[in-house]
Amino acid sequence: MEYTYRTDIGRKRPNNQDYVGLFANAAGTTLAIVADGMGGHLGGDVAAEMAVSHIGYAFEKTETTDVETIVRWLIFELQEENTVILEKAQQYADLSGMGTTLVAVIISGNRFVVANIGDSRGYLYRNQHLIQITEDHSLVNELVKTGELTPEEAEKFPQRNVITRSLGVSSDVDADVTIYDMEYDDYLLLCSDGLTNQVSDAEIAAVLAQPVPIGEKAGQLIDKANAAGGPDNITALIIHQDWRAQP
């Protein structure tokens, strides 16, 4: 397995409220997280860093490789971190209203768990096909699902950045958590909306298809988002399954 990530402030924002991390537990299981903070002043930075660092630290102390146990652990940790962010926001006036989206992958053997809340996305690139394996928790996605907007109209919808779920906003966490099988030569991409709002799925697939090191792929994705205007922070984390499982 090989991993890489790149994060960039973009061309319009005064600071980077994205936060990203890679962690391993005592059994060698891997956790990857991308968080995209939101909130006034420094709140977004704080919420995103808290979510990634706290969950990552807790994961490093675990020892399990059992996927079902991992799912239960992850759901519990997301709820715990949500409570911590809420309490911190209530303690400090300049952090009031802070929150963060989050997308995480935990890989154990030839299976992986994906969890997301908000509009940071997870993609699977397999056999030259790119599949979005998370669903955006956003107003624009809800309107597309109900038929009130077409996908084409959604791209120009003025409130496309309105999030319907996040960490740190309400007492309940409603994250999507799914288990998948992993195959040889699979790519997983975790990214913030600073990438997907500027770079199409077709462009992402074309980058992942190139026969270049994954670090170069991540760099190209960042460059494309910036070339399209870079209005937001941009983060891309790529995981490549580069070994074949033994029968």
Image (cartoon, rainbow, N blue to C red):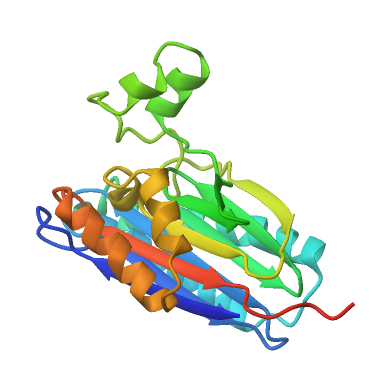
Quarter-of-image position of residue 63: bottom right
| Residue 171 in view (yes/no) | yes
Whole-percent x and y of residue 90? 33, 51
Does residue 202 appear left or right of residue 37 in this picture? right
Q: Quadrant of the N terminus?
A: bottom right
Q: Is residue 217 above or below residue 206?
A: below
Number of labelled discs?
A: 0
Residue extending farthest top: 148
| Residue drawn at x 58%, y 45% as measured from the top left | 175
Whole-percent x and y of residue 170? 46, 40
Residue extending farthest front: 211
Does residue 186 appear left or right of residue 47 in this picture? right
| Residue drawn at x 56%, y 46% as measured from the top left | 131
Quarter-of-image position of residue 219: bottom left
Whole-percent x and y of residue 207? 39, 60
Q: Nearer the viewer, residue 233 or 198?
A: 198
